[in-house]
Amino acid sequence: MTEKIKIGVVPYMNAKPLVYGLEQQKSSVELLLEVPALLPDMLNNDLIDVALIPSIEYFRNGNFAIVPDVAIASHGMVESVKIFSKVPIPDIQTAALDKSSLTSRALTKIILRGQYHITPRYTQCNDQYNISATDADAVLIIGDNAIKVADNGYVTIDLGQAWYEYTKLPFVYAVWVVKRGRRIPGVNEMLLNSKKTGIQHVKEIALSEAKRLNLPYDTCLHYLTKAIQYDLGKEEIRGLKKFYQCAVSMELAPKGERVIFNDV
């Protein structure tokens, strides 16, 4: 019997179209759900064969190859990566960052320094819903939680929109990767086909997610079809490289890494 391909993926709504087709292949694929911060180590330690990882971790690791043509990205407002601030943005002195995200933590630091010219003291956010109980002036929240949290009078920065205003480029939050030199025949085609299948069934996915998250169907459908983009084309790659340049300039990633694609 052929051993199943173990695929690590985030449990958020934005990944559902990417794995929709994989869920129909349970005889050959095993999906493991985990927060984005843990998936790179799982791949490093061979607990999984393929992972949907934060884009910053691709550059920090130096041992992965990107599966082409597929990503989680946005061309402007993303709706699921937000800073909620109790004070005007220039007055932020402390910011608590969602511990489950790595790319969004780096993006927060880049945007606050690059666009708003502030460098607050950063702490970790442990309670993703109760912003008012957090001592920090501002809180970064990602994923489904960011969509569900009400603004409640907070000053809100959508980091996808802030990045686009800062660079005029898309932002790439996550990419599929395998270990460099690891041959998994057909994996690129499998993941691309799964994306295509998910996009074809996006209304069905939105309905399922609306029930799971107790959100309006229209909110989920808009998010999956307008806010999130799933291609990794020339503009997305330009945005990915720009993000890396910004991360290097702030010592958030090592110098000398390149975008290398899996060629299997």
Image (cartoon, grey):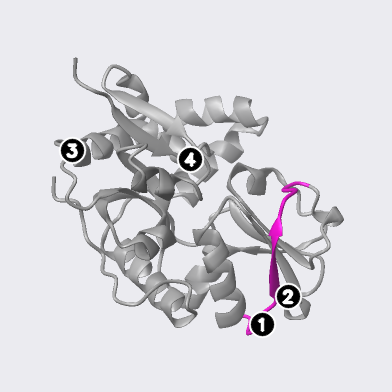
- The image quadrant of residue 24 is top left
Residue underneath mark 1? 118
Give SS at disc 3: loop
- The image quadrant of residue 249 is bottom left
Q: Residues within 10 Å of mark 3 (few under 14, many from 20)?
A: some
* Residue plotted at (49% across, 47% down): 36
Q: Nearer the viewer, mark 3 or mark 1?
A: 3
Q: Earlier in the sequence, mark 4 or mark 3?
A: 4
Tell whether label 1 touches label 2 (CB within 8 Å). yes
Q: Earlier in the sequence, mark 2 or mark 3?
A: 2
In three-dimensional space, the C-alpha distance between marks 2 and 3, rounded to whole angstroms, equals 47 Å
Give SS at disc 2: helix
* Residue plotted at (45% across, 74% down): 247
The part of the chain drawn in magenta is 115-129
Q: Is residue 13 left or right of residue 84?
A: left
Residue 89 circle label: 2
Is residue 225 covered in magenta? Answer: no
